[in-house]
Amino acid sequence: MLLPHGSIIALVDGTTCEIYRNAGSEAEPQLALLDPPMIDSTNNSNVGHRSSSGNHADRQVHEDAHARAVAAWLNEQVLSGRIKNLAILAPPRTLGELRRHYHSRTRHVLRKEVAKELAGFPAEAIMAALHNGS
């Protein structure tokens, strides 16, 4: 996959969000790790499931809230013009939650999605996943 210079690559899982920028060329991308975004995932009020003593969904509630918060941050970055090309790599369930909250303009700049957990992996593994699509 060719990534234009300046493209943003977001690696998201249930608790983290790593943001990279293609500092290289389109044909020879070089991923540069950016400072982590300030993600506020404390608002769990709009979640489809609740935790109780009989339903231990706390972890899923927090992971979904994190995905919603990341989607909100990405939407804001796209709407403000700071992201013009975007690729997202996330585990399948997290990717599904992210998709539910993309703004239409975020969908428009989204160049690639890969349903795979790669947070914490080296840049070579990220590029391989983007190239192979998995």
Image (spheres, rainbow, N blue to C red):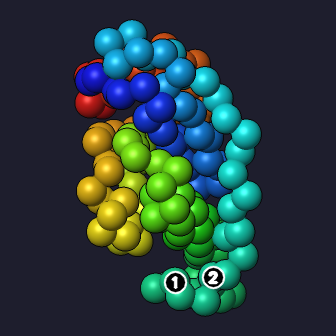
Quarter-of-image position of residue 61: bottom right
Query: How far across and how far down the image is residue 126, in percent?
Result: 46, 24
Q: Amino acid at mark 1?
A: Val
63 lies left or right of 117: right
Q: Amino acid at mark 2?
A: Asn
Write the residue at 32% across / 49% down: 110
> Furthest-top residue in view?
28
Write the residue at 58% across / 55% down: 14
| Residue 108, above or below 55 | above
Q: State the residue position of label 1.
A: 47
Write the residue at 59% across / 40% down: 19
Q: State the residue position of label 2.
A: 44
10 Å neighbourhood of mark 1: few (<14), some, or many (≥20)? few
Q: Are marks 1 and 2 in contact (CB under 8 Å)?
A: yes
Q: Which mark is residue 118?
A: none
Which quarter of the figure is the C terminus placed in?
Answer: top left
